[in-house]
Image (cartoon, rainbow, N blue to C red):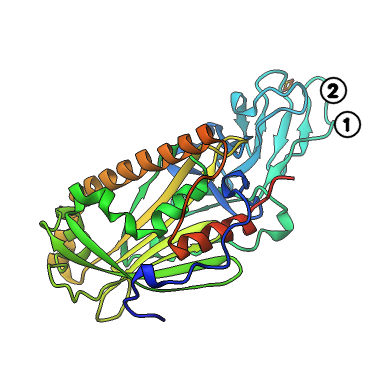
């Protein structure tokens, strides 16, 4: 790995995207969260979307959550307007009933003898407070993401998300390009990122940075993450690793002395509309619990500051990526002059992993 490389000295990658990545649709052959567990009440169907496809989620009184396309096979009425009956959902219009596999199991006025075709079902899993579906080929649904930090006891996890009006590629680029710390100067003070190096494979790319505070006070929210350890010491050696492992993104901060990450972020950007210009983010921000009762109490006390701190950062990021999307729409194409090889490579990776326009 290159150490403390000046970005300006990096060669421009030959992996520059050969097309406009904003026009590439996300690959459906991955697990995507479509709702938080808390949003789906027992026996109350919930309408959600994936890339323009309407989906209904159902939590029966007994049995696992399931997902179907949100339309009745009879007259296309959304099934979320129906009622949950046992481990099935009954359309609210004429009462056609579908089981968890989407099979039509009852039409009240013809009985069970000659039933029509049902509706599409999606592989569905509930993990870490999220409800996932697999929109693509079900035969490929064995690549569930690693959410270990958010499901174990070693971390305290904040679940956050919002709708953002931009293509998912803007979000990947924003998180991976730590050279945008200038945007957050009013919140974070003066922070200087130092690029350490990067590596990549067919469907992943990761980059490492260290940071040094060059001015201003450490925000309380940041102190909650680092236990107050980050100082003006320019030799601070905590290492931040940001990784896009298509279609997910992670950000881990490892302490200088080694050991478990002090912060472990998992995030994904799920297209809502068919044009994929609106996304819903689902993020799991996990902070390692300190040892001892006192340390854990301090983390709990600092938690509201961390929430407020991260919320302000995300709000600034949101404003920027939405303005990037608006510029792309107005210009009708990609006018960017990207000079950071990591971002050129990332954009190429996203384009190669997604579904390109015909
Ligand atoms: Fe659904 Fe008729 S529209 S049962």
Q: Position of residue 211 (x, y in %)?
A: 25, 67
Residue picked out by circle 2: 110
Query: What residue lies at 48% left-to-right and 48% top-to-bottom?
Result: 336
Residue 152 versus residue 42 in the image, above or below: below
Q: Position of residue 318 (x, y in %)?
A: 37, 41
Q: Quadrant of the N terminus?
A: bottom left
Instruction: Kindly state the secondary structure of the residue where label 2 is placed.
Output: loop
Q: Position of residue 295 (x, y in %)?
A: 15, 66
Q: Are marks 1 and 2 in contact (CB under 8 Å)?
A: yes
Q: 284 or 85, which is in the foreground?
A: 284
Q: Is residue 257 visible?
A: yes
Q: With respect to residue 220, does 89 lie above or below? A: above
Name the residue at 44% across, 41% down. 324
Q: Quadrant of ligand 1?
A: top right
Question: Tag on residue 113?
Answer: 1
**Residue 339 versus residue 356: which sits nearer the camera?**
339
């Amino acid at each position: 790995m290159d150490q403390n490389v000046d970005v300006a000295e990096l060669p421009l990658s030959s992996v520059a995207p050969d097309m406009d990545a904003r026009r590439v649709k996300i690959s459906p052959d991955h697990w995507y969260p479509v709702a938080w567990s808390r949003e789906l009440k027992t026996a109350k169907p919930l309408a959600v979307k994936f890339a323009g496809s309407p989906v209904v989620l159902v939590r029966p009184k007994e049995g696992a959550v399931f997902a179907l396309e949100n339309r009745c096979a009879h007259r296309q009425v959304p099934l979320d307007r129906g009622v949950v009956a046992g481990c099935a959902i009954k359309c609210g219009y004429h009462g056609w009933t579908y089981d968890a596999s989407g099979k039509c199991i009852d039409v009240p006025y013809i009985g069970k003898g000659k039933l029509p075709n049902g509706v599409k079902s999606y592989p569905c899993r509930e993990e870490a407070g999220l409800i996932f579906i697999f929109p693509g080929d079900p035969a490929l649904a064995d690549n569930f993401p690693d959410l270990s930090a958010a499901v174990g006891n070693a971390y305290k996890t904040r679940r956050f998300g919002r709708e953002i009006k931009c293509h998912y590629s803007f979000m990947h680029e924003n998180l991976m390009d730590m050279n945008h710390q200038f945007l957050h100067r009013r919140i974070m003070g003066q922070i200087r990122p130092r690029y350490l190096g990067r590596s990549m494979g067919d469907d992943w790319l990761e980059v490492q940075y260290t940071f040094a505070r060059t001015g201003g006070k450490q925000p309380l929210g940041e102190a909650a993450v680092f236990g107050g350890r980050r100082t003006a010491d320019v030799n601070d050696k905590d290492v931040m690793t940001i990784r896009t492992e298509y279609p997910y993104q992670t950000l881990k901060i490892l302490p200088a002395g080694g050991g478990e990450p002090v912060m472990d972020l998992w995030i994904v950007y799920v297209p809502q509309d068919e044009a994929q210009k609106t996304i819903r983010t689902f993020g799991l921000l996990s902070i390692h619990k300190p040892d001892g009762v006192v340390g854990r109490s301090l983390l709990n006390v600092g938690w509201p500051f961390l929430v407020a701190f991260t919320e302000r950062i995300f709000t600034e990021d949101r404003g920027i990526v939405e303005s990037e999307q608006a510029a792309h729409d107005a210009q009708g194409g990609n006018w960017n002059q990207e000079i950071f090889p990591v971002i050129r490579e990332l954009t190429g990776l996203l384009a190669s992993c997604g579904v390109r326009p015909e």
